[in-house]
Amino acid sequence: MIELNNNRQSFRHDVLIIGGGAAGLSLALRLNPGTRVAVISKGRENTGSTYYAQGGISAVLHSDDSFESHIEDTMNAGNGLCDEKAVRFAVEHGPDNIQWLADLGVPFTKDTHKDGSKSYHLTREGGHSHRRVIHAADATGRALETTLINHAQHNKNIELYDQHIAVDLITGGKLGLKHNRCIGAYAFNKARGRVETFQARCVILATGGANKVYLYTSNPDGSTGDGIAMAWRAGCRVANMEFMQFHPTCLYHPKAKTFLLTEALRGEGGKLLLPSGERFMEQFDPRGELAPRDIVARAIDYEMKRLGAECMYLDISHKSAAFITSHFPMIYEKCKEFGFDLTREPVPVVPAAHYTCGGIMTDLNGQTDIENLYAIGETSFTGLHGANRMASNSLLECLVFAESAASDIRNKLAEKHSWDKIRDWDESRVTDSDEEVVVSHNWDELRRFMWDYVGIVRTNKRLERARRRVDLLLSEIEDYYGNFRITADLLELRNLAVVADLIIRCAMERKESRGLHYTLDYPDTDDTQPVTNTILKP
């Protein structure tokens, strides 16, 4: 339903989903056909992180595997901080969600057996004790996202609004209502250059992670922590933001930017090498290249700093060319574009920020601290990942918690409802900016000091430096935000600064090294105290 008001557009739906990746779209598709759903996203299907996921989805799909094994592997990877209830919930709902995707038509890779029968090809990645990662060649995310988009476009009850970036949530508390429930959001229409009002009975944050806060990341440009920042400003608790996962192997090339070399390469026998050609991972962990990502990333970082090297190398050329090109066709072609032949030579790799393990605190239905506000996928904190996410558990989380949130939302929508009166966006006291350089300068400064001071290896002194800088930036950005008309770049910078502050504050509170948080001042894990999450309250 569209209401015209003072030449501005206001939209009213039953459900507003902010984010058009695996989490948001799968939730939209699981709602009742009569539910009016709006999905707002920054761009087309290739602008979010889902589209670029290469490896696959972890689930127990083979008779040799078991739920208990998957649970144990996840708990081990999480370094004592996983919530076993959340882990069990995700793992036990995995196979049904894979079947749901298969029924939608996601083209998962299959093996053909001698008798002509077929079964899903499962690969193995770091931290997994079994082959349990189902995939669509080496472009699982693209296959998943395009399938979900196709179904959403053909659902009459789902309206897709791309070129939109959410500004802030609308809550009862902000409007002076008795109940502080979420009743919508303001969103900036990038194509029209104006802010629109989206009112809804339930609002879902499915905005992905915040890894663009770092100078080097495997994520697309839109991974700016929008959902986490908006939920924090609205009054939600945030947890474990110190645990930022760095993927060990991104292609090292000035034009490659964010191209990731999937962990499945190492799962299929790829070896990590020094510039001299020697292997080094077994000096850091007996599992070698199949150690969890935090260990592999730190090992690469250590060797690069020890040797003064710009990169390490990943080599799978000992496998046949036919094997490489059939299992990793997209990666093979992409490497060739940059002048590397995966079948003949090692390729240069460096770590890059990859996944946000912390986020907005939710229950197993995705419900946040604010009534009618949900968070699912990478933007949420469910307790599944603990101090380190195990490979390919991310898409599993998107699917499982989208399903449980959809079930909870269906029950809420069955209740009686009356619409609240909300205000349109007010731009009467701001002007167009004449100093956009402030935004670009602050954007660059933020990402660089986060990389230098709050990266793979941290110290108290580095964190203190980062805290002083982020405090100044937050002040500058809020002053700028209050005086000038908003732009997409300003909104993302504003959110990144909030997220940076949350990461730094969480990192300063943890006086130990655990999982993805490694500090030279406290290099050991503290097993003398109860293991706790780092929870921040607004």
Image: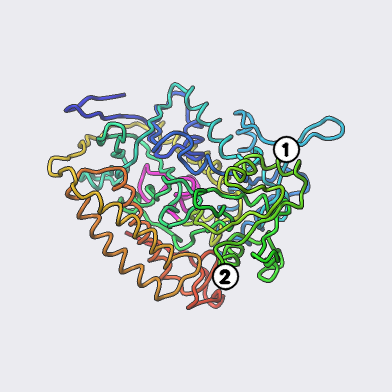
The three-letter amino acid code for the residue at tag 1 is Tyr
| Image: 393 above or below 501 | above
Q: Which residues are magenta?
A: 359-382
Left or right, residue 80 beside residue 374: right
Q: Secondary structure at mark 1?
A: strand
367 part of magenta stretch? yes
**CB within 8 Å, label 2 to label 1:** no
Q: Which mark is residue 302?
A: 2
Screen quadrant of the N terminus: top left
Screen quadrant of the C terminus: bottom left
Q: Position of residue 154 (x, y in %)?
A: 49, 22
Q: Residues within 10 Å of mark 1 (few under 14, many from 20)?
A: some
The three-letter amino acid code for the residue at tag 2 is Tyr
Closest to the camera, between mark 2 and mark 1, is 2
The residue that mark 1 highlights is: 120
Quadrant of the image occupied by residue 84: bottom right
Q: Position of residue 147 (x, y in %)?
A: 56, 30
Mark 2 or mark 1, earlier in chain:
1
Q: How many marks?
A: 2
Q: Position of residue 15 (x, y in %)?
A: 39, 33
Residue nearest the viewer, comparing 360 with 390: 390
Note whether residue 69 is visible: no
At 30% from the left edge and 69% from the top edge, which residue is drawn? Answer: 468
Colour theme: rainbow
Q: Position of residue 18 (x, y in %)?
A: 39, 39
Q: Residues within 10 Å of mark 2 (few under 14, many from 20)?
A: some
Give the farthest residue toward the right.
115
Residue nearest the viewer, comparing 343 with 137: 343
At 26% from the left edge and 30% from the top edge, which residue is drawn? Answer: 10
